[in-house]
Amino acid sequence: MKFIVKLFPEIMIKGGPVKKRMINMLNENLRTLLFRIDDSIEIKRFFDKIEVQTKDEFTDSVRKVLQQTPGIEQYLEVVQYETGDDLEAIAEKVAEHNLNLINGKTFVVRAKRNGEHQVTSSEIERFVGSYMYKHGESAGVDLRNPEVKVEFELIQNTLNVITKRQSGLGGFPIGMQGDVLSLMSGGFDSTVASYLTMKRGIKTHFIFFNLGGAAHEVGVKQVALYLWSQFGASHRVQFISVPFEEVVEEIFRSTHESYMGVTLKRLMIMASEKIAEVMGIDALVTGESVAQVSSQTLRNLAIIDEVSNKLILRPLATMNKPEIVKIADKIGTREFAENMPEYCGVISKNPVTNGSFSRMAKEASRFDYDVLEKAVEQSITIPVDKIIEDVNTTAPVEVVNTPDGAIVIDIRRESEASHAPLDIENVNIPFNELNRTYKKLDQSQQYLLYCEKGVMSQLHAQYLRDAGFENIRVYRPK
Ligand SMILES: Nc1ncnc2c1ncn2[C@@H]1O[C@H](COP(=O)(O)OP(=O)(O)OP(=O)(O)O)[C@@H](O)[C@H]1O
């Protein structure tokens, strides 16, 4: 199968050298991603498109990459036949893929030709056109204003017939716009904000502030890994985890209740700025959206902005919640967001909605910034692609590799579990039903959670531990 990759229109209108750099970058990114599938996949760069040629067994994997790689406007799927310039064979194959498209419609046939042939392009077009007219139920040929354009190419002896057009993500190739550090809580907003920066071609690193829950950290790592592997895996990025429990304690000690929420956000921005500085990053990203919650009024956002000289991008600033949720649905982060614990609630009681700059300064002067300094010093950075190993080695809940009398619960979705069943006895309780179902199980038994990568099982085992269940561990076969 061959794919023809068309670039995002905003790339095509750039000046020559910039356009060339962008196409080269997309070519590089595709090379990195597709060679991970198989190094026999061929990628060819042209001045206005990229072509990918693959063995049929890799077609689905290649499609997935093309759908999820920023910079691609659409891709065409092309089926290839060795017809030479045998007009009858060409017409038959073109008709096979196009006859149903011209039913009741006017059409035109357009052929591109490259190589030595006995026939000209217009002879081929006329032959195929009349064959399709004879065998189909079209409304006739219209050379000027056709409703359907039947396109194919004859390159040497190979006939390329376009069978499908599929939209891509659009945006710019990652690597063209520098790096940002995205404040990631794992909720709807920060996951969508991070996706939008990735789609715009920005290398997006993640920073997470742990307010006191091991499950939250595992959950955020998991969604960061998901986002990266779906949309950004052409480049290595970092995940930074900052222990913020003591910062929260210090906020409680020093700050009036109504300013705690805004203070927490200011401190997250200050810590992010320090870390971004070390990483050579100019901009931070948050999932804040004007008026969504009390800390996100224009005044409070301005009070938050005051603490940093970095550019703060807020891709969702003017979006409505339903639009954000729709994107989360489309990119697959809704499920993660819905399963993410909230640790912020306690700090958002009776929040000020229209904070005062001078009052904020007074509140801020009572805070001991050594505590923040220490949190930054204790931050831990790991490459996102090492998250699975990290979660499995630094797991808060014990991991075992033999059941030893415990009952194994496979928490994958039913379809995944039946597609690749475990080879030992187990029960299937999909993770989204676990919280509701677990308490109904016989609590005199020991249970082991299983999932494919060991991240989701670790996350849910930790939730259950937090909820007071001690008979739970993680199963990870050798
Ligand atoms: N624990 C955290 N670690 C990193 N960033 C955070 C954390 N909590 C909040 N943020 C950042 O602050 C933004 C606003 O957070 P807040 O909790 O006020 O709103 P939210 O709308 O619930 O955000 P989200 O849906 O992303 O959780 C988030 O989108 C995220 O960018």
Image: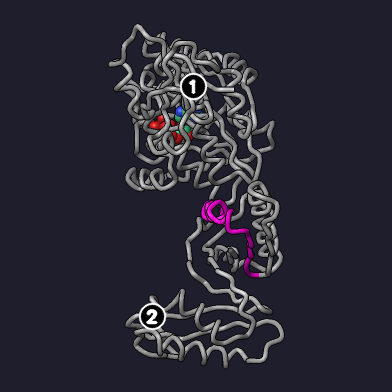
Q: Position of residue 43 (x, y in %)?
A: 68, 60
Task: Report the magenta residues as a range.
Answer: 48-68
The response on whether ligand 1 sits within 8 Å of label 1 is no
In the rendered image, the vertical position of residue 159 relative to residue 315, given as above or below: below
Q: What residue lies at 60% left-to-right and 85% top-to-bottom?
A: 86
In terms of depth relative to the viewer, which is nearer, 31 or 118? Answer: 118
Left/right placement of residue 427 relative to residue 36 reads left
**Quadrant of the image for the N terminus?**
bottom right
Q: Position of residue 365 (x, y in %)?
A: 51, 17
Left/right placement of residue 22 relative to residue 138 reads right
Going from N to C along the chain, the mark reached first, 2 or 1, is 2
Q: Where does label 1 land, which residue?
A: 458
Does the magenta portion include 302?
Answer: no
Q: What residue lies at 55% left-to-right and 35% top-to-bottom?
A: 225
Pointers 2 and 1 in contact (C-beta within 8 Å): no
Q: Position of residue 382 (x, y in %)?
A: 64, 28
In terms of depth relative to the viewer, which is nearer, 263 or 325? Answer: 325
Q: Please rate how many residues cluster around mark 1, counting C-alpha atoms within 10 Å: few if below 14, some from 14 to 19, many from 20.
A: many
Residue type at the position of mark 2: Ile
The disc label shown at residue 102, or none:
2
Q: Please rate how many residues cluster around mark 2, counting C-alpha atoms within 10 Å: few if below 14, some from 14 to 19, many from 20.
A: many
Q: Main secondary structure of the magenta part?
A: helix
In this view, which residue lies farthest toward the top? 444
